[in-house]
Amino acid sequence: MPPLTEFDPANSQTYEAICHCGAMQYSVTLSPPLTEQKVVSCNCSICARNGYLLVYPYRENFNLKSGEDVLGSYSFGRKRIMHKFCSRCGSAVFFDPKLESPDILGVNVRMFKDVNLNELELNHIDGWNSSPFVDSEHLK
């Protein structure tokens, strides 16, 4: 994954997102916009099974509008990352790595409205054979 950048309001875009059944609705503001960044496609066991295509916004740029009551959680292994999904339809929405710095989420672009996934530039990560999910050293 490319290093995270500081948030620039002048070079940002807000995306509306919804799970399959519509119970969870939220918005995500990305800087830079999707068209200017690579979306992470990881082949680790959970990313592959959940179909994640990931971007990493700062937590403050994620706004859950509805669906907190159907927000399910799952973690495994060292319980370091909490995966969030809609408990009604099973849509994998985001994960929370619970980092102090940077305070980010891994958000699944597949839930974004009006985004043509075929037009996204992907950064294929071999998560199956590696451990870190994000390069955040420069932000500490």
Image (spheres, grey):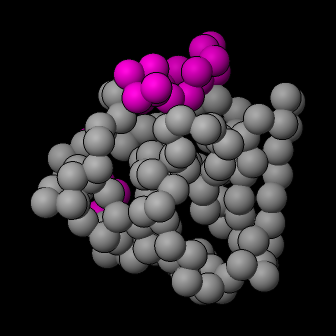
Q: Position of residue 6 (x, y in %)?
A: 29, 42
Q: How many marks?
A: 0
Q: Position of residue 27 (x, y in %)?
A: 44, 74
Query: Can you say whether 28 is above or below 35 in the image?
Result: below
Q: Position of residue 81 (x, y in %)?
A: 72, 40
- Whether residue 100 is visible to the viewer of this picture, yes or no, is yes
Q: 69 left or right of 130?
A: right
Q: 11 left or right of 100?
A: left
Q: 49 left or right of 101?
A: right
Query: Can you say whether 117 is above or below 2 in the image?
Result: below
Residue 122 in magenta stretch = yes
Q: 61 left or right of 104?
A: left
- Whether residue 122 is visible to the viewer of this picture, yes or no, is no
Residue 127 in magenta stretch = yes
Answer with the quarter of the image where residue 77 lies.
top right
Residue under the point 36% across and 43% down: 39
State which region is magenta: 116-140
Q: Quadrant of the N terminus?
A: top left
Query: Can you say whether 19 is above or below 56 in the image?
Result: below
Residue under the point 62% across and 38% down: 99
Residue under the point 29% across and 49% down: 7
Answer with the quarter of the image where residue 46 lies.
top right
Q: Position of residue 118 (x, y in %)?
A: 29, 54
Q: Nearer the viewer, residue 84 or 127?
A: 84
Residue under the point 15% across and 56% down: 11
List the single residue furthest toward the left: 10
